Image: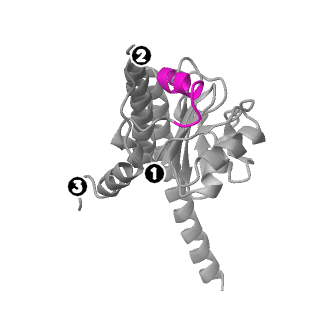
Amino acid sequence: MAEQSRDQRGERDVRDARGRVEEATAWEALVATARRTVADGLVVGTSGNVSVRVGDTVLVTPSGVPYDRLTPDDMTGVDLDGRQVLGTLVPTSELPMHLAVYRTTDARAVVHTHAVHATAVSTLVTELPSVHYMVGALGGPVRVAPYATYGTDELAENVRVALADRSGCLLQNHGTITYGATLDQAYDRTAQLEWMCRVWLTASSVPGLSPSLLSEEQLAAAGERLRGYGQRG
């Protein structure tokens, strides 16, 4: 019996060690992604936030800390109910929004930005006009979640609704949020969304002309092809 107990403790120790390594690796990738949002001009200062799910733990950027100052010792994590389980820094104020995504989708990573063109579009329309087939990569026409104060459950609920059958949306007078199976995928979707918003604003600015838009059938066909895009191993 004692031998079995020692074996069980040993297995737990191994699992715990693997979990810590996985969290450390995920945190490193999260910090790199957060810094990338700044370098690529998608956020200014400490605006925006990034998270990644490891098991039932969600690692998140902490509130108000410049991304270039984050170190491995600053790892911040919560469970799916929002209880802090890792670190001492206060999690991002947008935690309710991130958790709403994880609870209702298959997301493994979430990126929220204040990208300039996307934020501008969010003040003009309730849905991004379909100017490019890459909206298919987000599941279809990109909705705008109605405005609510940042960090509130109301905003989290608005985002949840806007993300139904989508992997990204705009936040009215606020910015963007996208998710993916990896941090790279979530980030790429954010970058694509910002680019499409820039295309629409640029085309819409030509006096006397209106951008041509893709039909539902054209978008559906593009979406089908996008699902098979890339290398297959």
Q: Amino acid at mark 3?
A: Gln
Which sits in the foreground, 211 or 92? 211
* Secondary structure of the residue carrying numbered label 3: loop
Q: Is residue 174 magenta?
A: no
Residue 220's place in the image compared with 90, above or below, is below
Please give the residue where the numbered disc 1 appears in the rendered image: 139
List x then y, in percent, for residue 69.
54, 22
| Residue farthest along the top direction in this orientation | 207
Compute the Cα span from label 1 to label 2: 27 Å
- Are the residues at dot 2 and dot 3 in contact (C-beta closer than 8 Å)? no
- Is residue 40 visible to us here? no
- Are the residues at dot 1 and dot 2 in contact (C-beta closer than 8 Å)? no
Residue 105's place in the image compared with 168, above or below, is below
Q: Earlier in the sequence, mark 1 or mark 2?
A: 1
Instruction: Give the side of residue 120 with respect to residue 134, left or right.
Output: right
Please give the residue where the numbered disc 3 appears in the rendered image: 231
The label number, if any, that marks residue 205 in the structure image: 2
List x then y, in percent, for residue 108.
51, 52
List x then y, in percent, for residue 58.
61, 48
Instruction: Give the side of residue 179 with respect to residue 151, left or right.
Output: left
| Residue farthest along the bottom direction in this orientation | 1
Q: Nearer the viewer, mark 1 or mark 3?
A: 1
Q: Point out the stretch of residues depicted in magenta.
A: 114-127
